[in-house]
Amino acid sequence: MSEACGADRPGDATIRVRGLKFRSGGQDLLEIADLKIDTPAPTMILGPNGAGKSLLLRLMHGLIPPSEGSVRVGSGGTAQAMVFQAPILLRRSVASNIMYALKVQHVARKRREGRLNELLELGGLARRARQPARTLSGGEQQRLAMVRALANEPKVLFLDEPTSSLDPHGSQQLEALIAKVAAGGTKVVMVTHDLGLASRLGEEIVFLHHGQVREQTPEAEFFERPRSQEARSFLSRHLVLP
């Protein structure tokens, strides 16, 4: 199931990373001295395989503790959620998956039915409400995971390669949903290998290489005039945009 955590009253969406290190097997996999994410529009985390992108996302969401340093999301009581590359759905209907999340997040009983309908409509799943969740298509499952993660109305939503296993149609529908969520005021921080998607949705790019932040720049500047040699080499190996 999509992980979510936070307080009853979401705070601001500023993310601050300081002196962060993560070690495993005697190796430093991530080392970030200072990173501040405070733009309200989506932030895309890019980099080659093994750069530490998904690891950073898990550390920011609090799923794993750092070896050193700190991560702070908002005021410390900011509601947040995360959607993974492969959604984990309960063996029950689409509506029941969302209702379960609403109960777990302590949404008031009188609000649950209305909120359920809102989320079903947002995800384009109203006609699938009674269908077993695990019989949905891949794109529909990922949209269900997305709206279920919104049960606690998070101020920050972390997305880890949500479109990587989808066909073009499913990816397009999920991209449209992400855009709606971001337009609604939720801060989106997303790891992706799809550079076209990153350019279309992102306002800011955080580029990782060998566990370190090499660039944090506006989207247009990153794709047109990358500052670091690592980013230039990375982009030269990919078809970015026509």
Image: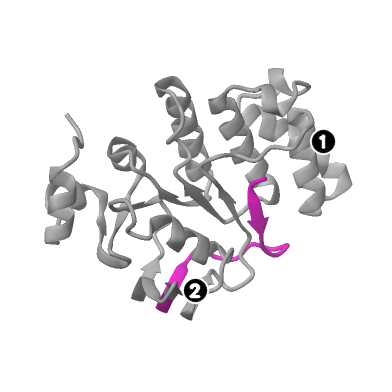
Q: Residue at x 57, y 34 (%)?
A: 142
Amino acid type of the residue tagged 1 in the rendering: Glu
Q: Is residue 152 above or below residue 131?
A: below
Specify the quadrant of the image occupied by residue 92.
top right
The answer, for residue 227, to whether it is visible in the render is: no
Amino acid type of the residue tagged 2 in the rendering: Val
Q: Residue at x 57, y 73 (%)?
A: 75
Magenta residues (range):
1-21
User: Quick one: label 2 or label 1, which is nearer the N terminus?
Assistant: 2
Q: What residue is shown with label 2?
A: 71
Q: What residue is shown with label 1?
A: 113
Q: Nearer the viewer, residue 124 or 33?
A: 33
Left or right relative to 204: residue 134: right
Q: Nearer the viewer, residue 217 or 40?
A: 217
Q: Residue at x 42, y 36 (%)?
A: 164
Crowding at label 1, few (<14), some or many (≥20) Cα neighbours within 10 Å?
A: few
| Magenta region includes residue 19 | yes
Specify the quadrant of the image occupied by residue 91.
top right
Label pair 2/1, CB-CB below 8 angstroms: no
- Residue 114 placement (x, y as % from top left): 78, 35
Q: Residue at x 53, y 50 (%)?
A: 186
